[in-house]
Image: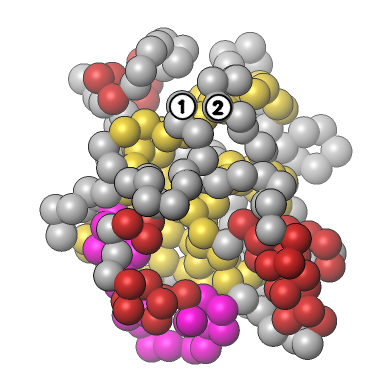
């Protein structure tokens, strides 16, 4: 799903903090992103063919003070250190070290970490309570990497996009953060919306920290507000 221009062996970490603020569960036919115990975004095969796909947002994009903001769960000083590293991701021996504040709020389990340019990104913008359908990969570009934003898209702050655009012109390569279940098909953009927009403006492959949860972690039926649709292959028994 994620294609790198430079090879780096993946790093596998085990999270055991029991905070479980961010959870991604699913399988080949769909996934669910939950934050603070509430479903936020869901994707699913539409079962109309091999490429038909659906996505829906259950909650509006977060605002200041909202518990669905990652910053509400991370110490401010730790968050600023993480943001500083993402702004200029210098090589480190273990990605888990600068990513520690984020990893600590993930649901317990094993995750694979990479820092890599991601090519052929396609953003799937989803409005609250309005299911969106599309053809996964499409027909002309079957290798597209579909990414669902967790905040507003397009990003609203033009000045921030311009800041990152200038950084890219100066050969800087700030990193966004993508999260997925390794058995699924969709990536969720957790952080770096304005960065990705700037990369797209410049026609460059965005550098991303990719965090893949390792299976098995099926979706809990009780976690869904309503049937979406009856995806029994991805439900917990």
Which quarter shows the C terminus?
top left
Q: Residue at x 37, y 72 (%)?
A: 79
Neighbours of disc 1 within 10 Å: few (<14), some (14-19), many (20+)? many
Q: Residue at x 64, y 24 (%)?
A: 132
- Dividing the picture into quadrants, the one containing residue 35 is top left
Give the dominant element type of the magenta stretch: helix, strand or loop. Answer: loop
**Residue picked out by circle 1:** 58
Residue 222 percent location from the top left of the image: 25, 19
Q: Look at the image and give the residue range highlighted in magenta.
A: 84-106
Q: Does 19 sit above or below residue 27? A: below
Magenta highlight on residue 90 = yes
> Is residue 160 left or right of 96 when viewed as pictured?
right
Find the distance from the CA under tag 1 to the CA under tag 2: 6 Å
Front one among 155 and 150: 155
Q: Does 57 sit above or below residue 124? A: above
Q: Secondary structure at mark 2?
A: loop
Neighbours of disc 2 within 10 Å: few (<14), some (14-19), many (20+)? few
Q: Counting residues from the N terminus, which is met first, the one under dot 1 or under dot 2?
A: 1
Residue 93 percent location from the top left of the image: 38, 88
**Residue picked out by circle 2:** 128
């Amino acid at each position: 799903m994620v294609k790198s221009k430079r090879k780096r062996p993946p790093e596998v970490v085990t999270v055991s903090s029991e905070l479980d603020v961010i959870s991604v569960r699913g399988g080949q036919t769909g996934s669910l992103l939950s934050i603070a115990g509430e479903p936020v975004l869901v994707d699913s095969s539409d079962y109309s063919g091999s490429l038909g796909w659906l996505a829906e947002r259950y909650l509006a994009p977060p605002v200041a003070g909202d518990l669905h903001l990652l910053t509400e769960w991370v110490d401010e000083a730790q968050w600023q250190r993480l943001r500083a590293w993402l702004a200029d991701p210098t090589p480190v021996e273990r990605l888990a070290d600068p990513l520690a504040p984020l990893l600590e709020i993930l649901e317990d389990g094993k995750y694979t970490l990479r820092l890599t340019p991601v090519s052929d990104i396609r953003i799937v913008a989803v409005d609250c309570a309005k299911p969106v359908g599309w053809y996964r990969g499409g027909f002309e570009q079957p290798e597209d990497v579909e990414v669902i934003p967790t905040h507003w898209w397009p990003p609203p702050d033009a000045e921030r996009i311009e800041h990152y655009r200038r950084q890219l012109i100066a050969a800087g390569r700030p990193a966004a953060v993508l999260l997925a279940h390794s058995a699924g098909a969709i990536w969720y953009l957790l952080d770096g919306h304005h960065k990705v927009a700037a990369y797209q403006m410049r026609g460059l492959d965005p550098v991303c920290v990719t965090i893949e949860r390792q299976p098995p972690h099926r979706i809990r039926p009780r976690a869904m507000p309503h049937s979406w649709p009856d995806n029994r292959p991805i439900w917990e028994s």
